[in-house]
Amino acid sequence: MSGHSKWAQIKRQKGANDAKRGAMFTKLAREIQVAAREGGGDPDMNFRLRLAIQKARDNNMPAENIKRSIERATGGGGGEQLQEITYEGYGPGGAAILVQALTDNRNRTVSDVRSAFTRGGGSLGESGSVAWLFEPRGLIVVNPGDRDPDEIALTAIDAGAEDVKTEDGTVEIYTQPNALERVREALLAQNVAVEHAEQTYLPSTTIELNDEQATQVLKLIERLEDLDDVQRVFSNVEFSDAVLAGVG
């Protein structure tokens, strides 16, 4: 999973410097709105909202924007009527790709997603075509600093984590979706600096492509992520360091 995780890290680093901050804030606001609409506007009682707010803060979204997004969702009208939709498709080399979107216009979104797949050398699939290859998981990313990574791993495992990986000075902790909050709180209680926590999808098995195909898949993923309605994209490709260096 190292290639998958490194690509996610590259995206976060690029997001801090890209000129696409406005589009990023729009996507973050939508995630906050959906979380608040589903579970209420109190982050202490709504873990999904708490994660969405933390992600917005990590990306330097102004507090006023966060507050406005929550009010828009809980104020009884005025907000977008957003739907959560998952699209499935194939990329170059047979890569499986899962696309999560939030939209107020299904026809527009499916047209944009289909076009992105086609232009990227892939194809939009039917519902269920690739989703079975992915499993929902919680992901917590920790920068250990001066802490012993093994100590952090033991804390996470004792709290219910399934797997812990340490690479390039970063500790990645994987949990079942319903254990994410418990593990995150256990780490915070030990003063472990949690850089990032989210619900994600991991491929049950990965595939390795040649560098040309893998690069094409990365470009397709970027094309999909650039769509206004797309929140996150997942693939089952194990990207090599050489390919990631070319897009970093």
Image: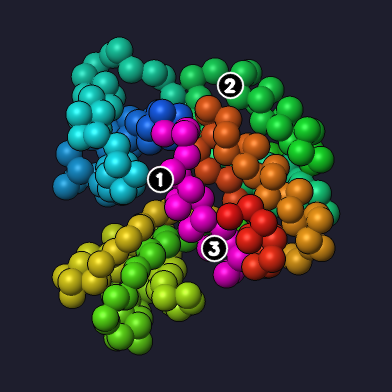
Q: Which mark is residue 16?
A: 1
Q: Main secondary structure of the magenta part?
A: helix
Q: Is residue 162 left or right of residue 101?
A: left
Q: Helix, strand, or loop for circle 2?
A: helix
- Distance from Cα at disc 2 to Cα at disc 3: 31 Å
In the depicted structure, whether residue 125 falls above or below residue 44: above
Give the residue number, with chain letter if any, for mark 2: 106
> Quick one: label 2 or label 3, which is nearer the N terminus?
3
Q: Which mark is residue 6?
A: 3
Of badges 2 and 3, the one in the foreground is 3
Of badges 2 and 1, the one in the foreground is 1
Looking at the picture, tell me which residue is in the foreground, 27 or 155. 27
- Distance from Cα at disc 3 to Cα at disc 1: 16 Å
Q: Is residue 239 left or right of residue 136?
A: right
In the depicted structure, whether residue 68 falls above or below residue 138: above
- Does the magenta-highlighted stretch encompass residue 19? yes
10 Å crowding of disc 1: few (<14), some (14-19), many (20+): some
Q: Helix, strand, or loop for circle 1?
A: loop
Residue visible at 41% across and 72% down? 170
Residue 99, quarter of picture: top right
Residue visible at 78% across and 33% down? 119
Amino acid type, label 1: Ala
Tell me where the magenta segment starts and ends, as one range: 1-21
> Quick one: label 3 or label 1, which is nearer the N terminus?
3
Residue visible at 17% across and 39% down? 42
Amino acid type, label 3: Lys
Of badges 3 and 1, the one in the foreground is 1
Task: Please report contact status of discs 2 and 3: CB closer than 8 Å, yes or no.
Answer: no
Looking at the picture, tell me which residue is in the foreground, 84 or 220. 220
